[in-house]
Amino acid sequence: MKIPYGKQTIDDTDIAAVIETLKSDFLTQGPKIKEFEEKFAKYVGSKYAVAVSNGTAALHLACLTLGLREGDEFITTPLTFAASSNCGLYCGAKPIFADIDERGLLNELEIENKISLKTKLIIPVHYSGFVCNMEKIKEIAEKHSLKIIEDSCHALGAEYKNSKIGDCAYSDISIFSFHPVKHIATGEGGMLTTNSKEIYDKLILLRSHGIEKKDKWGQDMTCLGYNYRITDIQCALGISQLNKLNAFLKQRRNIANYYDCAFKNNSSIEIISPLKDEHASYHLYVIKVKNSETREKLYDFLKENNIFCQVHYPLVYFHSYYKNLGYKEGICPNAEKLYNQILSIPIFPSLTKEEQDYVIAKIDEFFKIN
Ligand SMILES: *Cc1c(COP(=O)(O)O)cnc(C)c1O
């Protein structure tokens, strides 16, 4: 028995949906893409959705569409997957890292401190499935005429002040990933949502080479686009997974609640809790090890017991590529402190009660002797 920190949940209806598409006329550029986009937009409450090959492609297209280019700066968090920042590098822009709060979310004051005349946009990340203070972030963005791309890869199904993540109530574009560890899986896959027709039209064009179809065989390439298309096979799986999303979310929230109760009285760790106007989606369940010196030992101990945790994330500017660009330790002290304490323990819909009890028992056992 090996327990990973996260994995997909695929059943026979998912498999049947994929097989049906394999037998259909379209493996790509067919009707399943539009169907997935429409159902996704309806679920999150946005006007438009554009499905793409993965979450990173979604981030790249979002930056391009909002006009990010060489010489610009954008602000994001260091506690995220590198793609949240790489997307801006693709456009020749410079990532500026702002510090985070104790829940791992971008701090609004830190954002404001990092704004310069070159700043073009902000990319908040709803770390682990908790929601950034979007009201404040939007206020700051409006004050300084900045655009907002929400990296919502952790937050499909999360809610905040009567708004569902993805409805773009507080942003220009929201992006998602369907990598197998995320809330719904398509193998590889991603989505952008927006309420702007203009942004939607640009995204459709950029997703497929920048080429517009004209009459008969006529085509015109009006901008430099990419092949960031998703396939009908993946979208068929996505539609089938989306049908189960509410059940998946319920299972994730139940597990989180169970862990919360179990760890409440453990004085060696701290848990991260949602605020009252926030309904978290628990892509990850992150514990903070108060004595950071024991974090690695805990990781090893759990691994010896077949529980495979992970650290989300080594800070973006700790990567050697970023160090070579000139980023140095000390930019975001809170993030650096938090990075040394965090550990993501198993959470995914099919994690059984027995497995949850086993994880809890092993963590308790570790802290009895450490
Ligand atoms: C998964 C993830 C991405 C990238 O998604 P891919 O589909 O793997 O390209 C970007 N940002 C965050 C925060 C993620 O968790």
Image (cartoon, helix red, strand yellow):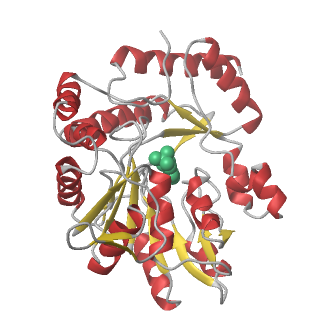
Q: Quadrant of residue 324?
A: bottom right
- Quadrant of the rendering where the C terminus is positioned: top right
* Quarter of the rendering containing residue 110: bottom right
Q: Residue at horizontal 59%, vertical 55%?
A: 102
Above or below — where is 7 with respect to 81?
above
**Residue 9, percent across and down?**
32, 28
Instruction: State the residue at coordinates (51%, 32%).
Output: 265
Residue furthest top in the image: 1
Q: Residue at x 50, y 14 (%)?
A: 2
Residue 163 visible (yes or no): no
Residue 316 position in % (x across, y down): 68, 54
The answer to which quarter of the image holds residue 68 is: bottom right
x and y, in percent, of residue 213 in the image: 27, 69
Residue 14 locus on image (x, y percent): 22, 29
Asked whether, in this view, residue 15 is left or right of residue 280, the answer is left
Residue sitting at x 61%, y 64%: 90
* Residue nearest the observer in this picture, 174 or 270: 174
Q: Is residue 308 left or right of residue 200?
A: right
Residue 55 appears in the figure? yes
Is residue 95 found left or right of 210 in the rendered image?
A: right
